Image (cartoon, coloured by chain):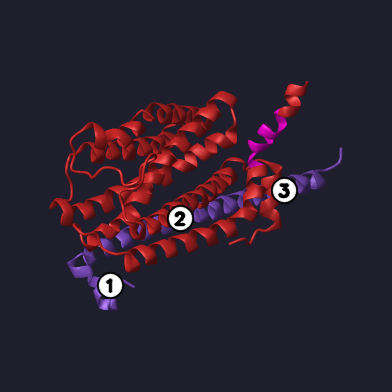
Amino acid sequence: MYFDSLQQLMSMNGHGIYVWSSFAISAVVMIGLIVKPLRQKQAAMKNIELQIKLQASKQAAKQTEVADAPHS
Amino acid sequence: MNFNLQWTWFHRLGSPRWFYQKTQRWLPWLAIATLALLVTGLVWGLAFAPPDAKQGNSFRIIYLHVPASVVALAGYYIMAISGAVGLIWRIKLSFMLMRSAAPIGAALTFIALVTGAIWGKPTWGAYWVWDARITSMLILLFLYFGVIALRHTYSNNEAADKAGAVLSLVGMVNVPIIYKSVDWWQTLHQPATIKFTGAPSMHPDMFAPLVVMIIGFYSFYSLALILFARAEILRREYRASWVRQLVTNQPAEK
């Protein structure tokens, strides 16, 4: 390692604040770029699941309606 | 006849289903490679590389600033070319990739601008200057924002796709301007560290971790692009039977 101690690595002769804040901001943004699409995918899947359930219950209601209807 | 046969691969490549299934297997490997490259490059660059003779340790910001900028620019070409392919051949997947590229490009441009501003403080004495390179980079950010915003202005997906593609293509003019801005105008921004012709203006001990970081950012970009595109596919292909099967087979996927 170029630095003698962890403390020196953190301070970087006074430049640590610039280097480490750059690092922190980049890390937060990049983690966000991975988390966001994963959440979007989950939301999309839930949405589709809900639609399928809704369709199934509608169909079931229709069928019972037909079954209950008096035969003429 | 023969012509049709040869073009089937092209259409399969444009199938969202094919893309979704293929990328499933790539994702874990791409994630591991990205993490390994970024960790190696950062530890090497931030802790082991020697400091710059003039700038001291603040120069280490280069290991985030340059890769983010390089990939933000390359990502603009990816977005614009995807838009063009979508317009010309009417391939839906191509438009999905274009839409996915916009938020990633915007985020990377943001990183480039913010790290640049932070680097400017100890080096130039100011966070922000209205210099050609920085201003043209800010325009790039607004172009990315424009493509993101366009999707919300149309209720019709196809119209939004076309408008986004046209905006991306028009905005492509800005990219060579960014590249050349440090040569064309007198600027505070230092000239390119890496040149296509000739040796890099950097010591190998400093240059090697930068190369690792640039490859790492490209790898990260592909990973994020695939993740965004997969979410986009599910959102837009919700009527397709293969998507419905996917959902009912594994409803608890988290």
Could you tell whether B250 is left or right of B105 in the image?
Answer: right
Q: Quadrant of residue B177?
A: top left
Badge 3 is on which residue? A61
- Specify the subunit that label 2 lies on: B
Residue interval drawn in magenta: B7-17
Hue used for the chain lettered A: purple
Quick one: quadrant of the N terminus of chain B? Answer: top right
- For this orientation, the residue located farthest to the top is B1
Task: Judge whether residue B130 is colored magenta.
Answer: no
Q: Amino acid at mark 3?
A: Ala
Please state the horizontal and vertical placement of residue A12, each as a whole percent of the image: 23, 69
Q: Amino acid at mark 1?
A: Leu
Q: Are marks 1 and 3 on the same chain?
A: yes
Name the main secondary structure of what is drawn in magenta.
Answer: helix
Badge 2 is on which residue? B216
The numbered mark at residue A9 is 1
Quick one: quadrant of the C terminus of chain B? Answer: bottom right
Query: Could you give the CA–CA distance between mark 2 and mark 3, rounded to whole angstroms?
Result: 54 Å
Residue A9 visible, this orientation? yes
Structural crowding at the residue carrying mark 2, measured as other residues with C-alpha within 10 Å and reported as few (<14), some (14–19) or many (≥20) = many
Indicate the chain coloured red by its letter: B
State whether residue B171 is above or below residue B70: above
Q: What SS does tag 2 mark?
A: helix
Q: Nearer the viewer, mark 2 or mark 3?
A: 2
